[in-house]
Structures are given as structure tokens and as C-alpha cells.
Image (cartoon, rainbow, N blue to C red):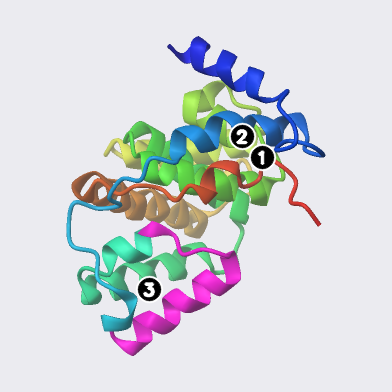
Amino acid sequence: MAFRMVGRGLRYLKSPPLFQGKSLAEKFVAAVGNRNMSQEKPISRFPVPNMDTLPEDMQERMKEVEEKGGFLPNVFKVLAHRPDEFRAFFMYYDALMLKEGNLTKAEKEMIVVATSSANSCMYCIVAHGALLRIYSKNPLLGDQITANWHSADLTEREKAIIQFAMRVCRSETIEDEHIAALEKHGLNTEDAWDVGTIAGLFALSNRMAHLTNMRPNEEFYSMGRVKKEK
């Protein structure tokens, strides 16, 4: 089935004028990816409130995100079902993911993608795989980590970070030796806290995505894969 779909997609690549001036990657996304993703499905099995009915602080947050990124990720829409929990989740998210520290933005996203893959969370794999491609400037890394982080093109430091995160993800006992393994790569106990709490927060996020049947935005699929037209 997959091979027939790819074959049909490749035949579409030859058809002008829709694909004139586009790279091969852009043509493939247009011919195969967009056709497959065009079937609209509910983004949650729970009620999704209209933005204009939400408290003002939530509206402002959502509008700011949409203006900055060009679209509003569905996680904001879905979690808006419960405003107090929405605020609590994103406050913790900001505290972990936006603060300056020893972990890079790409390393944080590696933790999210690896642990979300272990938890089979489609939303977080797709959404944070896109952010990882952007922050790492590597269009392959997110897919590699999703499939098998052990075989991904990672540095020894990155492998140590993900290995520690996976212990937290699997609720395995954390010993001093595991933190010592991070210290060999220039990371300290505070960094270990950050790695663990990111894995912990996204364990919650993964389970909420499963509970709500949250669907990723189509925009995420091509982010960081093809160059934007100027």
C-alpha cells in the first residue's frame, strides 16, 4: 500500500504547472503529504472552546503564539478545555523549555522526541520533531531519534542526555552513578534535574495527547524539511 502511494506521488511530480519552480522535496510533500493530510479530523474528543469565549489572558497567549509562528498549535486549543490546567501546564512548560541554561534548545527537544517516541505520542513526536529540525538545523535528526535514538547521529553528550531521560521516562530507579555519567559530559546535578523534569512534563503531555486523541497541525509535518520561499 505504502509503495503504491509513493508511486502515485512520484507520478504527480511530473505534472505542471502546480509544481513548477519547486524542489523535489517540496514537490513530494505537495503531491503525497498534503493529499494524505487533507482529510480533516477532530483535533480532540473533548469540546474545543472558541477562542473568543476564553479568559483574556489565554486569548492573549494564544494570539501571541499564532502571530509568532504563523499558526496556533492544536495543543493550545485542546488544553483550553480546562483553563486552570491550561495555565498550569504552560507555566511549567515555559519554566523548563524557555529558560536559559546548560541545555540547548535542540537538546531539550531531543529529550521530548525520544521520550514521546517511547510513549507512542504522535502529537509530540510530530510537533517537537519539527522544533528539533529547526533548532538543530538538521532535517534528519528528529526522524532518526523517533525510530531508534541509539542509532541516531548524536554526540556522546546527546546520547548521555537521552539515556538519562529515558530512565526517567521508564520510571527506572535513578542512582548517583547515572548523574555521574552526565557529569562526564559537562552537565551537573541541576542539569540532571532539567533533563528529568522535561521527561516528566512530557510524560504528562503524552498521556494527555492519548486521552484527548490530540491531532498535530498539518504545518508541523514540513517544518524544517524544506526551505521557505522568500
Q: Position of residue 146 (x, y in %)?
A: 48, 31
Residue 214's disc is none
Kind of residue at disc 3 = Met
**Residue visible at 62% across and 39% down in the picture:** 157
> Looking at the image, is mark 3 or mark 2 nearer the viewer?
2
Q: Main secondary structure of the magenta part?
A: helix
Name the residue that disc number 1 marks.
225
Q: How many C-alpha atoms fall within 10 Å of the one at disc 3: few (<14), some, or many (≥20)?
A: few
Foreground mark, 1 or 2, reads: 2
What is the quadrant of residue 10 in the picture? top right
Q: According to the image, label 2 marks what residue?
A: 29
**Quadrant into which the N terminus falls:** top left
- Residue type pointed to by label 1: Arg
Tell me the magenta residue range: 55-74
The image shows residue 76, relative to residue 14, as above or below, that is below
Q: Residue 189: image x %, image y %?
A: 48, 55
Report how many numbered discs are placed on residues in the image: 3
- Quarter holding residue 155: top right
| Residue at image coords 57%, 36% | 142
Side (left or right) of 189 relative to 7: left
In the rendered image, residue 101, in percent from the top left (x then y), is placed at 59, 64
Q: Which of the two residues, 213 or 161, is positioned nearer the viewer here?
A: 213
166 versus 196 height, above or below? above
Q: Is residue 181 magenta?
A: no
Disc 3 is placed on an element classified as helix
Alpha carbon distance from label 1 to label 3? 30 Å
| Residue type marked 2 | Val
Question: Does residue 175 appear in this view?
Answer: no
Give 175 or 124, whichever is nearer the viewer. 124
